[in-house]
Image (cartoon, rainbow, N blue to C red):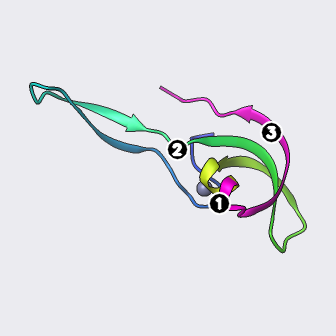
Amino acid sequence: MANICAICDKRPQSGNLVSNANNRVKRWVYPNVHVIRYRLKGQTGVFRDAVCTKCLKAGKSEKVILLIDLTFRDY
Ligand SMILES: [Zn+2]
C-alpha cells in the first residue's frame, strides 16, 4: 500500500517546504486515498484497493460497499 490510487494512478508528489529565509526542505504531499471495496462501472468484479477521494466523489467506482480502513503513510 503505497498511497497510490488504483483508478486514476494519483501518487505522492515531492516538493520543497520553503521557509521565510528561503531554506528549502524536501516534503511529500500525499493523495487522500482510502482502502475500500468497490466495483467499476460495467464490470462485475469487486476489488479491494486504495482509491482516492476524488475518484470516490466523481463516482468512477460504481458502488462503495464497505469503507474499511484509512491508508497509512510510510514516513
Ligand atoms: Zn483516484
Eyeballing the image, is 16 above or below 60? above
Eyeballing the image, is 73 above or below 30? above
- The picture places residue 67, in percent across and down from the top left corner, at 80, 39
Q: Residue 15 lies in what quarter of the image?
A: top left
Measured Cα–Cα span from mark 1 to mark 2 = 13 Å
Q: Within the magenta stretch, is there residue 65?
A: yes
Task: Specify the farthest residue to the front.
Answer: 57
Quadrant of the rendered image holding ligand 1: bottom right
Label 2 CB less than 8 angstroms from ligand 1:
yes
Q: Image point 47% across, 25% down: which residue?
A: 75
Q: Nearer the viewer, residue 1 or 66?
A: 66
In the picture of the structure, the residue carrying the numbered disc 1 is: 7
Considering the numbered disc 3 on the image, is that residue within a helix, a strand or a loop? strand
Q: Which amino acid does label 3 sit on?
A: Leu
Q: What residue type is labelled 1?
A: Ile
Q: Within the magenta stretch, is there residue 11?
A: no
In the picture of the structure, the residue carrying the numbered disc 2 is: 31
Marks 1/2 in contact by CB < 8 Å: the verdict is no
Numbered circles on residues, count: 3
- The picture places residue 68, in percent across and down from the top left corner, at 80, 35
Name the side, left or right, on which 9 lies relative to 69: left
Measured Cα–Cα span from mark 3 to mark 1 = 16 Å
Task: Estimate how packed mark 1 is, as few (under 14), some (14 to 19) or many (20 or more) residues with alpha carbons within 10 Å.
Answer: some
Q: What residue type is labelled 2?
A: Pro
Frontmost of labels 3 and 1 is 3
Residues shaded magenta? 57-75
Name the side, left or right, on which 50 lies relative to 23: right
Name the side, left or right, on which 33 lies relative to 15: right
Marks 3/1 in contact by CB < 8 Å: the verdict is no
In the picture of the structure, the residue carrying the numbered disc 3 is: 67
Label 1 CB less than 8 angstroms from ligand 1:
yes
- The picture places residue 4, in percent across and down from the top left corner, at 57, 48
